[in-house]
Amino acid sequence: MKLTTHHLRTGAALLLAGILLAGCDQS
């Protein structure tokens, strides 16, 4: 369970980073 939560958190962080990078790229 802990591993799953950790993976979910990591996935969310990576998604956020990707969105931020994409936003910077568009500007």
Image (spheres, helix red, strand yellow):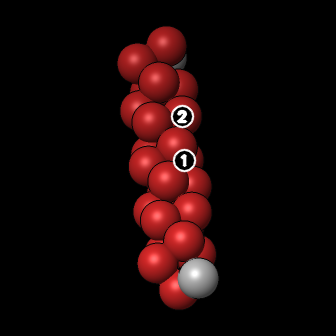
Q: Position of residue 18 (x, y in %)?
A: 45, 36
Look at label 1 and name its amino acid: Leu
Residue lying at the far top in this picture: please name it.
26
The total of numbered circles placed on residues is 2
Dot 1: what SS?
Answer: helix
Residue lying at the far front in this picture: please name it.
1
Mark carried by residue 16: 1
**23 or 2: nearer the viewer:** 2
Residue displayed at 44% across by 49% down: 14
Label 1 and label 2: CA atoms lie apart by 5 Å
**Dot 2 corresponds to which residue?**
19
Residue 24 visible in the displayed image: yes
Q: Tell me whether the residue at label 1 lies in contact with that at label 2, contact meaning CB atoms closer than 8 angstroms.
A: yes
Q: Quadrant of the N terminus?
A: bottom right
Q: Position of residue 8 (x, y in %)?
A: 57, 63
Mark carried by residue 1: none
